[in-house]
């Protein structure tokens, strides 16, 4: 069973992706059936860390709407079929609780920005898919960790946003989008979210500029 986990990790790594842990399904996890009458027993989370995925994606044709979502499905679906899994995605409708699932399988913590933070990669990671298996899989034991935000006294992420879009009441999504359509927002549009860039954790894994621009353009739309 452990070989299966490693084999899947190798398969997704060929496309710049990574297995981001997994968990045995509990009744209150909200995991759908693998297929009608076949409940899921194990979920593996698939995501990207650092710049590896971008290099793989950028080498492909990306015309048309939602190119990254289409690329993700084209890459992950055959891998799921090979290993007898069902793939679901964070862009599926209705949406699934991917962030909650991610914390079930990997030491991730909510940052002051509302994004999940990783001790190694900081805020430079994302979830791309989940693989649902009808059988139990042997999962690796992960070391206990605490949030890096607990020891971060300065909290530079909370003072870097030019419009104070992040507060105790949450993220001002519409205010941020409106600002990005103004002339004053050029630094954010060119260099990415100032609050995210300000986080010192995992800074060496920051996405390449082309990826940052891609995500900022998508957010503006």
Image (cartoon, helix red, strand yellow):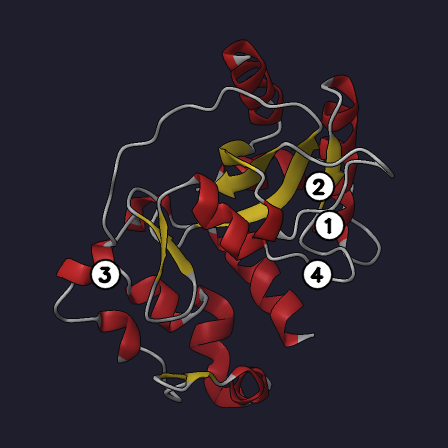
Question: Which one is in front, 130 or 1?
Answer: 1
Query: What distance separates the C-alpha of mark 2 from that of mark 3?
Result: 30 Å
Query: Which of pointers 4 and 1 indicates the residue nearer the eye?
Result: 4
Q: Is residue 124 left or right of residue 1?
A: left
195 over 38 or under it: above or below = below
Query: Which of pointers 3 and 4 indicates the residue nearer the eye?
Result: 4
> How crowded is the residue under tag 2: few (<14 C-alpha within 10 Å), some, or many (20+)?
some
Q: Secondary structure at mark 2?
A: helix
Query: What distance separates the C-alpha of mark 2 from that of mark 1?
Result: 5 Å
Question: Which one is in front, 156 or 92?
Answer: 92
141 over 164 or under it: above or below = above
Query: What distance separates the C-alpha of mark 4 from that of mark 1?
Result: 14 Å
Question: Which one is in front, 79 or 25?
Answer: 25
Q: Secondary structure at mark 1?
A: helix
Q: Secondary structure at mark 4?
A: loop
Q: Secondary structure at mark 3?
A: helix
- Could you tell me if the residues under marks 2 and 3 are in contact, i.e. CB atoms within 8 Å? no
Marker disc for residue 95: 4
Query: Mark 3 highlights which residue?
Result: 149
> What is the number of callouts on the image?
4
> How crowded is the residue under tag 1: few (<14 C-alpha within 10 Å), some, or many (20+)?
some
Q: Residue at x 77, y 32 (%)?
A: 77
Query: Mark 1 highlights which residue?
Result: 69
Residue 126: percent from the left, percent from the top? Answer: 52, 50
Query: What distance separates the C-alpha of mark 1 from that of mark 3?
Result: 30 Å
75 over 93 or under it: above or below = above
Placement of the N terminus among the 4 image quadrants: top right
Q: Residue at x 62, y 70 (%)?
A: 219
């Amino acid at each position: 069973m452990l070989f299966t986990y490693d084999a899947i990790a190798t398969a997704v790594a060929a496309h710049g992706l990574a297995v981001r842990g997994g968990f045995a399904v509990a009744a209150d996890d909200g995991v759908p059936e693998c297929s009608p009458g076949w409940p899921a027993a194990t979920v593996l989370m698939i995501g990207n860390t650092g710049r590896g995925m971008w290099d793989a994606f950028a080498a492909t044709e990306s015309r048309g709407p939602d190119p990254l979502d289409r690329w993700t499905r084209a890459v992950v679906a055959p891998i799921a079929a090979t290993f007898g899994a069902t793939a679901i995605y964070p862009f599926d409708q209705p949406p699934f609780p991917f962030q909650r699932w991610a914390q079930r399988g990997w030491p991730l913590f909510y940052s002051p920005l509302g994004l999940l933070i990783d001790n190694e990669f900081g805020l430079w990671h994302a979830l791309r898919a989940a693989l649902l298996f009808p059988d139990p899989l042997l999962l690796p034991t992960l070391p206990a960790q605490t949030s890096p935000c607990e020891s971060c006294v300065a909290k530079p992420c909370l003072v870097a946003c030019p419009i104070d879009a992040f507060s105790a009441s949450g993220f001002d999504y519409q205010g941020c989008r409106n600002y990005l359509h103004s002339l004053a927002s050029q630094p954010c549009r060119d260099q990415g979210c100032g609050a995210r860039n300000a986080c010192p954790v995992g800074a060496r894994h920051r996405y390449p500029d082309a990826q940052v621009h891609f995500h900022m353009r998508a957010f503006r739309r």
